[in-house]
Image (cartoon, rainbow, N blue to C red):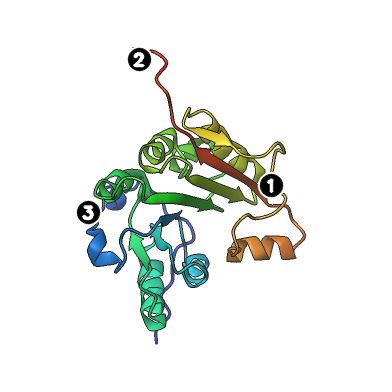
Amino acid sequence: MAVVRVRQHVNPLANKYQIPANPLEWEKVYPQPNQPLHLDIGCARGRFLLEMAQAEPNWNFLGLEIREPLVVDANRLRCELGLTNLHYLFCNVNNSLTPLLSTLTPGILQRVTIQFPDPWFKNRHAKRRVVQPELVAELAGYLAVGGVVFVQSDQKFIAVEMCDRFSEHPAFVKMGTEEWLAENPLPVPTEREIGTINKGEPVYRALFVKREIVNIDSPV
């Protein structure tokens, strides 16, 4: 079998990634479409979700990834394992989240993970980073009240930026009193997380919960 080379960095602002994904027909994607949904943004090879789907069969899992060859390979492995509560989709999340989630039953999306996103170190490339204010606002609109967003990175400035973006939105509250979580609250670590820890390097983690926003200007 020929080895397909996959680029490590993909510019989400490139013209080829400006076509949004089509809305999903959830009942065709999952046999149990009303199970709670875990959305993993930037799932890469998808091994994290592969293990999560087996650990939590009463959840549905959706991985979004901008590098199409990785999605093709991940879906092939998912099919080989017969996992019906797991699906991977090729898309640019920064223009596809609303089209994808617009057909989702309210309250179904209960968990979101954004783990070790491409840091795009140069300031002039900051708009290429995945966690933009627009993405946070979209997640606030679709995530169930009480649902959570878990973010982590091995680059502190990226972790700080992600936390700032979520903290700036009134729908999200950071959990815990410490600046960073000492442990991953999920039962499965990512490959990047394992590699970082094995090298003795820090991982910066934070958990946010979606709260109900009360309009104080509304009449009583």
- Residue 198 spot, x, y in % from top left: 73, 65
Circle 1 — which element?
A: loop
Q: Upstream in the sequence, badge 1 or badge 3?
A: 3
For residue 73, above or below residue 97:
below
**Identity of the amino acid at label 1?**
Leu
Q: Which residue is at a point 41% across and 78% down the rendered structure image?
A: 77
Q: Which mark is residue 181?
A: 1
Question: Disc 2 designates what residue?
Answer: 218
Nearer-the-camera pick, 197 or 54: 54
Circle 2 — which element?
A: loop
Residues tagged 1 and 2 counted as in contact (Cβ below 8 A): no
Q: How far is mark 1 from mark 3, CA to CA?
A: 36 Å
Q: Which mark is residue 22?
A: 3
Q: Residues within 10 Å of mark 2 (few under 14, many from 20)?
A: few
Q: Which mark is residue 149?
A: none
Select label 1 or label 3 by which is in front.
1
Select label 3 or label 2 by which is in front.
2
Residues tagged 1 and 3 counted as in contact (Cβ below 8 A): no
- Residue 156 spot, x, y in % from top left: 66, 43
